[in-house]
Image (tube, helix red, strand yellow):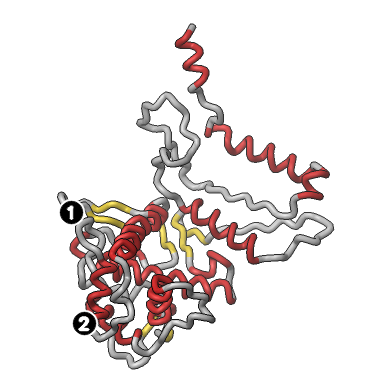
Amino acid sequence: TEDEKKEKKDGIIADSSFFTLNSQAALSFYQSDETVRKSYKKMYHVGWPVDPIDYSKDKNEAKTNTGGDTQKNGCHLVDFLCATAAWDFFNNNDGFNAEKVNIYYKSFKMNNNILDIDHNDVLGDGNNAKLFVKKFNSFYRFMHMVLSVGMGAKGENNGVKAFQVRLNKNNIKDYDTLATEFMADLNTYMRMFGYSINPNNNAFNSGWIYQIKNSFEGKFVLENSSFTSEIKELGSKFNFGKLYADDHEFNWKDGSLIGSNDGADWADEVVKKLLEVKPSTNAQILNNKKEEFIAHIYNALNSIKTN
């Protein structure tokens, strides 16, 4: 019948309950097939053994959703791990000329089924971990400068524009010509990355990084307080100066803000740092004023020394 044809057409093409079994079968094939062994030198198998999630629960769609713009599942730690695997692939040349397959296993520390992930767990210890801390730390702080201190989390506000105004008031006029559209787009990106607040009902909405943190119980690189969703804590006084544990904390060189709990004070100090550290057009490969703006902020945030 037509109904049977439609049911077959919209049926499940890959039942998630067989994912583990299918993966094991695929891995056995990859490991034993001679053509695969000669042609493919690296493969990353990322798994999640803790509390599997049934994404089909409470859903009524008949048509199978295989991803794309219509997929509405929340982001998960596995998404982040896949990104780090991609980074490792493009930045690690080990193993390409190996005569045999070397298998490496990596897992996170767990205590009573609670994960404890620090920066060394993400890309390994050493220089890669230091690079990750610098990049992630600066971007996350800038996110809170825009969304929390600049109130950009609410749709009618533009936290990037608020920061530009702060620069102008401190006689930094290099970025007065930045297009309003660019600042609005950057503000929107930060909201999608971090969080947004509905201006009508003050409801908190998690973005990409918040969804990843909320996908498991435990610590994700930063202190748990850095991922607060309490509206009253995410205003202009949010202390984005303290995101890490004490042994990874950052202080200003003159020590003027050690112990400060006012995000506005920290934002003012970032502006002062901008006067000391200029972006390097050649070294940082900057092509326009927009890239220069972001690089300048990054340099300022990284002019902070560790304890």
Give residue 232's quadrant in the image.
Answer: bottom left
Whole-percent x and y of residue 293?
Answer: 38, 75
Q: What residue does disc 1 label?
A: 199
In the image as oriented, which residue stretches furthest toward the bottom?
Answer: 254
* C-alpha gap between disc 2 and disc 1: 27 Å
- Which residue is pictured at 34% across the width and 88% down the height? 275
Above or below: residue 76 compared with residue 264: above
Is disc 2 surrounded by few (<14), some (14 to 19) or many (20+) residues within 10 Å? few
Question: Under tag 2, what secondary structure?
Answer: helix
Q: Using the image as rendered, state which of residue 286 and residue 246 is in the foreground.
A: 286
Question: Under tag 1, what secondary structure?
Answer: loop
Whole-percent x and y of residue 93?
Answer: 71, 65
Above or below: residue 28 compared with residue 268: above
Whole-percent x and y of residue 120?
Answer: 53, 70
Q: What residue does disc 2 label?
A: 169
Residue type at tag 2: Lys
| Residue contact at pointers 2 and 1, CB within 8 angstroms | no
- Which residue is pictured at 41% across the width and 51% down the height? 215
Give residue 208's quadrant in the image.
Answer: bottom left
Q: Would you say residue 307 is visible in this rendering?
A: no
Whole-percent x and y of residue 159?
Answer: 26, 66
Residue type at tag 1: Pro
